[in-house]
Image: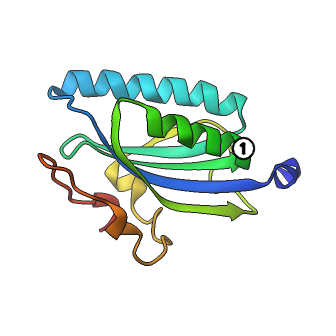
């Protein structure tokens, strides 16, 4: 991955809320579509990461890392994606080494995601605004 350093690697961790996907089958279809697209797009753009989705609260946490220009462009697209609301970057930093060595996107269950966000800067969680009609238990931070 020595070539990664020449590209200037960054990591972005964001939080968002999925728009109303009332029934579980619809939620699973949308999440599968996002994962399939992300795996293909990210591999082509040397981006790696993890997606966590809470079906009860509709919260999304995503961890993106890779070449600065590609990750910033992807995050900009995510911010405009109509499937998301209240997208907030919790962390955006330059990195020297990837956590996710292979490119693509992995799905994380609540158990898988424990500890992965432990190094967020102080106050990052205060940026998460809970919109009317939503609840949050912020499971990955417990």
Residue 59 visible in rendering: yes
Q: Nearer the viewer, residue 127 or 62?
A: 127
Going 71% across and 33% down the picture, which residue do you hit? 45
Q: Kindly identify which residue carries mark 1.
A: 69
Going 23% across and 40% down the picture, which residue do you hit? 55
- Residue 112: % across, % down: 41, 53
Q: Nearer the viewer, residue 72 or 109?
A: 72
Q: As displayed, is residue 21 above or below residue 86?
A: above
Going 16% across and 48% down the picture, which residue do you hit? 134
Res 71 quadrant in image: top right
Residue 101 visible in rendering: no
Going 56% across and 45% down the picture, which residue do you hit? 49
- Residue 51: % across, % down: 45, 43
Q: How many marks?
A: 1
**Considering the image in quadrants, where does the C terminus appear?**
bottom left
Left or right placement of residue 95 versus residue 81 in this view: right
Q: As displayed, is residue 111 above or below residue 29?
A: below
Left or right placement of residue 109 versus residue 105 in this view: left
Left or right placement of residue 11 versus residue 61 in this view: right
Few, some or many residues within 10 Å of mark 1 (<14, 14–19, 20+) = few
- Residue 32: % across, % down: 40, 25
- Residue 37: % across, % down: 53, 24
Q: As displayed, is residue 34 above or below residue 90?
A: above
Farthest bottom residue in view = 122
Left or right placement of residue 6 versus residue 88 in this view: right
Q: As displayed, is residue 130 above or below residue 85?
A: below
User: How was the colour assigned to the protein in this rendering?
Assistant: rainbow
- Give the SS element for disc 1: helix
């Amino acid at each position: 991955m020595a070539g990664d350093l020449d590209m200037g690697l960054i990591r972005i961790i964001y939080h968002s809320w999925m728009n109303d996907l009332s029934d579980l089958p619809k939620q699973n279809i949308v999440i599968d579509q996002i994962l399939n697209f992300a795996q293909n797009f990210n591999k082509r753009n040397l981006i790696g990461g993890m997606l966590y989705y809470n079906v009860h609260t509709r919260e999304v946490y995503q961890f993106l890392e890779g070449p600065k220009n590609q990750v910033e462009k992807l995050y900009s697209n995510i911010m405009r994606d109509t499937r998301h609301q209240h997208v907030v970057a919790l962390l955006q930093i330059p990195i020297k080494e990837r956590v996710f060595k292979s490119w693509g996107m992995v799905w994380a269950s609540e158990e898988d995601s424990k500890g992965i966000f432990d190094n967020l800067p102080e106050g990052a969680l205060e940026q998460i605004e809970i919109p009317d009609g939503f609840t949050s238990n912020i499971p990955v931070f417990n």
